[in-house]
Amino acid sequence: MKPFEYLEHTADVKFRAYGHSPEEMLSNAAAALFKSMVDPFAIQAKETWRVLLEAPDLEQLAYNWLSEIVFLFETESAVFSTFTVRLQQDGSLRLEGEIGGERIDLKRHAFENEVKAVTLHEFQIKKNDVWCIQVVLDV
Amino acid sequence: MLNINKIEENIYEVPMGYRPGMRVPGRIFVSEKLRNMVEPGTVDQVANVATLPGIVKYSMAMPDAHLGYGFPIGGVAAFREEDGIISPGGVGFDINCGVRLLRSNLDSKSVQPLMNTLIDALFEAVPSGLGATGRLHVSDQQLTETFLAGSKWAVEEGYGVEADLAHCEENGRMKGADPSQVSVKARKRGRPQLGTLGSGNHFLEIQRVEEIFDDAIARKFGLFKGQITVMIHCGSRGAGHQICTDHLVVLSQAVRKYRIDIPDKQLACAPLGSPEAVHYFGAMVSAANYAWANRHIIAHWTREVFERYFPGSQLDLIYDVAHNVAKIEEHNVDGQRMKLYVHRKGATRAFGPSRSEVPEAYRDVGQPVLIPGSMGTPSYVLCGNDRALELTFGSACHGAGRVMSRSQAIKKFTGKDVKAALNKDGIVVKATSPGMLAEEAPQVYKPSGEVVDVVHNLGIATKVAKLVPLGVSKG
């Protein structure tokens, strides 16, 4: 299983991310989002950010998770390379995420794109042999 | 070949039944040549929009149409107030992304020798690119005032002059803002970014008027051959993106609540008059006003730079247009006057002389329609015609439209090559992230002249002037 792959899209960035579990899929999706902007090997996980999210279902939780990463990238001026996700179901679905990264240094972080938002266009989660999420990013 | 029918020159129809559930046919305004550049996915998106409740006449796509999310880019659709909807998919994430054009009293011969210095100074004066925060430090209260009053707030704070306001769509302040519907997150993204250009296809450009197509209207707009103009292309920055993100989540729930069947999740919407629709509209208008204030502040700093190098020079605002917005407008539909929510997603309003929304100064000719080029390609000034009201609810294209994906562009060009090619053509470029220039290479866009010709030939808007870039500051 490859963690993720990019698909052709004229104006934006489209990818599919996979996982043996929903947690792994969400972690890989975050990595795909970030790799579309900057080389992950140029990022050192010097600092840790924690997020807590809640949603009625996995699809909305996934949307909130990826949107939260865009929000942190912009408001913290940080780039991320490691993503750990834990899910808990009690009534609603809860996500606890741990994100490793560092503050942006344009000398070391050469950006190819800037992700500005996560769209819901063709947004879907499927489970066949493995879990799969498809996402189109607004860049 | 795409399954669309030619109705007349430059007008193609997406027939009822192209996909199930269409309430009206689609209309795509393209020439033969541009038709071949329209991807099947774009036609699907035109058809998807045609299924939304309360849509009137047609789901439309302008000549620069290309694949978007929800609506196509270049998409226009209007919905009845009584039974229609509002959708952020028809506005986009960058709410009130738009274009502002300033005319100088300088001629290119006197400015050209200083181009490198000028672009360096503008690059310095107007923060741009990734992670750029503004020179401004606005309080939460001032941010609220920006959401409420847009350009008017900027002028009161000393950015720009009163006369500018009469030369902005909506006078730079759209009615109906409700900042209480703007989340803490959107404020957090928006606050440090007021007075910044952003990245991607946004730019600040020094241009020369290369060609005048219509002498009388050009005089009205104060344009002459060889003149220096300045174009600013940007929007509502992180504030708009977060507002769209937040309300998409709410509206995704609303489609279930109101049992609206949508073919694409990005077309999440709510019935007009419902709390969800009212809240989104109030937040969207707040972002639109933020964008007008943003362009106002950037224009002010541009004027300061010109004043430094050309003391006594004038930079007067010709006009400022929004090309990502939903607005309440009255239109004639089958002989009836109707109040409609017109969504323009990557489309510019192009009102002719009959509309009271056109500024006093242009009332006898029509509003200026500003079509930005991509980096290195010409921009155009057109003038809105009443014919547009019949054809497109008074709308025109907004740019050239992409033909090549960003990933293809990055494989094909490097930022360095793009910069070198532009320099060879005598265009000075300065960018924060040179790597990002590749995806904006001029070759990734459709030929802008062809797009503008379709608009002109259909009578939507009249070509007035062609502007070529001399210097560009980018994110």
Image (spheres, rainbow, N blue to C red):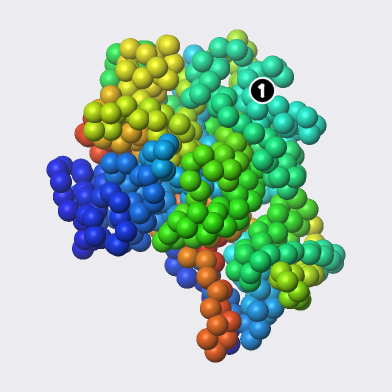
In x, y percent, where is residue A59?
A: 60, 69
Q: Nearer the viewer, residue B431 or A28?
A: A28
Identified at 61% across, 23% down, the residue is B151
Q: Given the image, what chain letter belongs to the residue carrying mark 1? A: B
- Up the image or down, B444 lies above or below B359; here it is below
At mark 1, the secondary structure is helix
Q: Residues within 10 Å of mark 1 (few under 14, many from 20)?
A: many
- Provide the residue designation for mark 1: B154
Quadrant showing the C terminus of chain B: top right
Count of marks, rendered view? 1
Lateral position of residue B293 relative to residue B139, left or right: left
**Could you tell me which residue is drawn at 48 percent across and 46 percent down?**
B271
Q: Nearer the viewer, residue B294 or B402?
A: B294
Which quadrant holds the N terminus of chain B? bottom left
Look at label 1 and name its amino acid. Ala
At x 52%, y 70%, the residue is A124
User: Residue B198 location, x and y as percent?
Assistant: 62, 43
Left or right relative to B47: residue B320: right
* Vertical arrangement, residue A21 with respect to residue B201, above or below: below
Q: Position of residue A15 (x, y in %)?
A: 53, 70
- B302 over B430 or under it: above or below: above
Among the 4 quarters of the image, the one containing residue A62: bottom right
Residue B325: % across, % down = 49, 38
Instruction: Please say whether residue B177 is visible from this viewpoint.
Output: yes
- Residue at 63 percent of width and 71 percent of height: A58
- Residue A100 horizontal side relative to residue A55, left or right: right
Residue B109 in view in this figure: no
Q: Is residue B281 above or below residue B409?
A: above
